[in-house]
Image (tube, rainbow, N blue to C red):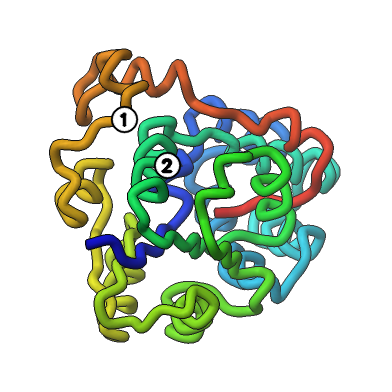
Amino acid sequence: MAGTVVFDLYGVIGCHQSAAARHRIEELAGVAGEAFWSAYWAERPPYDAGLVDAGAYWAGIAGRVGGLRAPVPDLVAADLASWSRFDPEMIALLRTLAAGGWRLGLLSNAPAELAAAVEAGQDWLDVFAVRVFSARLGVAKPDPRIYRHCLAALGAPATGAYFVDDRAENVTAAEALGMRGVLFTGPDDVRVALGYSTVQSQYFASAGIHGNGSSGQRLRDQASTSTASTAATNSGGGR
């Protein structure tokens, strides 16, 4: 019987930064490797939670690495572009679930600029009855308040609702509230948890994309949806 499922965005539906995208950010920053990325992630939590803006975020990184080469708008645009790929197999699965009567929610740790860019460029987001981005609420996962806010907006109790995320600490926090956690490693984790293990969208079945095999992954990569044009005209970045 259909119910409620809340999905994380990046690492589940959205793809993590590619090597090429990371290299582009490093070029603009003028700092490469661990020195840059440790600063990038250390400064991220308040940015994701909407407690600082993009300027303050990049200033924080600059303070940690001794300065940045490119101006903030260029860094922001490159950061947005690095989060602009989405898995078409997961998008197809979301549509299958929505058509099957599941009530879907999105719960993402993302700064305001990235949330705006994604919403402007991805029409498949209409499968979600509720979309919650951390920067708009002022709190981020795994804080229990953001889960409660999403569930309240969905009009669903925690008990019986599913939560899908690729980070164990976020899944654990959801389970502590009574939700059914699904630690995501691929689309089949969702199918099995929801009893859709034999369901494949018509598109992917005809394209020969099944599971996580290398041929399927190549086709998914070729079909990945991009918001690069949106990134060029918006400010922000994050997870």
Front residue of this view, candidates 26 and 205: 205
Q: Quadrant of residue 101?
A: bottom left
Q: Position of residue 99 (x, y in %)?
A: 39, 46
Q: Are marks 2 and 1 in contact (CB under 8 Å)?
A: yes
Q: Position of residue 1 (x, y in %)?
A: 22, 62
Residue 57, relative to residue 79: is it above or below? below
Figure quadrant of the C terminus: bottom right
Q: Which residue is mark 1?
A: 201
| Residue found at x 34% / y 59% | 165
Count of numbered tags: 2
Horizontal relation, residue 220 to residue 124: left or right:
left
Q: Secondary structure at mark 2?
A: helix
Horizontal relation, residue 189 to residue 222: left or right:
left
Horizontal relation, residue 135 to residue 156: left or right:
right
Residue 95, relative to residue 85: is it above or below? below
| Residue found at x 21% / y 46% | 191
Kind of residue sitting beneath label 1: Ser
Kind of residue sitting beneath label 2: Arg
Front residue of this view, candidates 49 and 187: 187
Q: Position of residue 50 (x, y in %)?
A: 69, 71
Q: Position of residue 126 (x, y in %)?
A: 58, 49
Q: Secondary structure at mark 1?
A: loop
Residue 224, relative to residue 191: is it above or below? above
Q: Which mark is residue 10?
A: none
Which of marks 1 and 2 precedes in the sequence? 2
Query: How busy is the neighbourhood of tag 2: few (under 14 within 10 Å), some, or many (20 plus)?
Result: some
Q: Which residue is mark 2?
A: 95
